[in-house]
Amino acid sequence: MTYAGEHVDATITAINMQKALQHRSNIDAIETRVHPGDLSEIEGVRQCLKECTAGIDLLKTGSSLGAREILDVLSQLRSKRAYFLRLAIGYDLINNNITSETIPNCRQQYEDATACIDLSPAHSTPEMVCGARENRMIALEFLKITFKV
C-alpha cells in the first residue's frame, strides 16, 4: 500500500531526472559548438559548468538519491564538473587571473572528484574514476601551492 506522498516523490524524482538529462544533453551541445570554433573554449567550459551545477542541484534536491539511475547521472555530472573546473582553473592560472572563486572552485573540483571515486564501481566507470583521480591530484597540488603546505 502506498500513500499519496510516495506518488508525489516518484513524480518529482522522474521530473528531476528528465531535467538533469536535459542538462547533460546541453553539455554535449555546448561541447560540439566549441570544436568548430563557434564558441571559445573557456566560454564553453563556463557554460558547461553552469549546466553541470544545475543538473547536480536538481538531482540533490527533491530526488530519491538512493535510486540507481539518479546516482549514475549524478556521478556523471560530478565527474564532468570536476573536469570543467580543472579547465577553468587552469585557464585562470595561465592567464594569471586568480579570483576569489578560484579556491572554492578548486575545493569543489576535489569534492566532485572524490564523490565520483566514492560512487565506484556501482555508478562510476573505470574511465570516470581514472579522470577523477587525476582531477583530485591536480586540485590538491593547487591547494598545496596556494596555502604553501
Image (cartoon, rainbow, N blue to C red):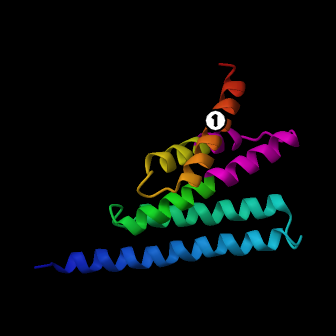
Percent from the top left, x then y, of residue 95? Answer: 88, 43
What is the residue that sits farthest to the left in this orientation? Answer: 1
Q: Identity of the amino acid at label 1? A: Met
Left or right of 2, for residue 47: right
The answer to whether residue 121 is above or below residue 16 is above
What is the residue that sits farthest to the front in this orientation? Answer: 126
Q: For this rendering, which residue is in front, 47 or 100? A: 47
Percent from the top left, x then y, of residue 131? Answer: 62, 48
Which residue is drawn at the image coordinates 59% and 53% (left, top)?
127
Percent from the top left, x then y, of residue 114? Answer: 51, 43
> Badge 1: few (under 14), some or many (20 or more) residues near its Cα, within 10 Å?
some
Q: Which stretch is magenta? A: 82-107
Which of the 4 image quadrants contains residue 98?
A: top right
Left or right of 81, for residue 16: left
Q: In which quadrant is the N terminus drawn? A: bottom left
The answer to whether residue 81 is above or below residue 35 is above
Residue 99 shown in magenta: yes
Which residue is drawn at the image coordinates 69% and 54% (left, top)?
84
Which residue is drawn at the image coordinates 23% and 75% (left, top)?
6
Which residue is drawn at the image coordinates 73% and 59% (left, top)?
46
Q: For this rendering, which residue is in front, 97 or 29? A: 29
Percent from the top left, x then y, of residue 53? Answer: 58, 60
Residue 56 shown in magenta: no
Which of the 4 image quadrants contains residue 37?
A: bottom right
Left or right of 134, for residue 93: right
Which of the 4 image quadrants contains residue 35?
A: bottom right
Q: In which quadrant is the C terminus drawn? A: top right
Does dot 1 land on a helix, a strand or a loop? helix
Kindly identify which residue carries mark 1: 137
Report the magenta stretch's main SS: helix
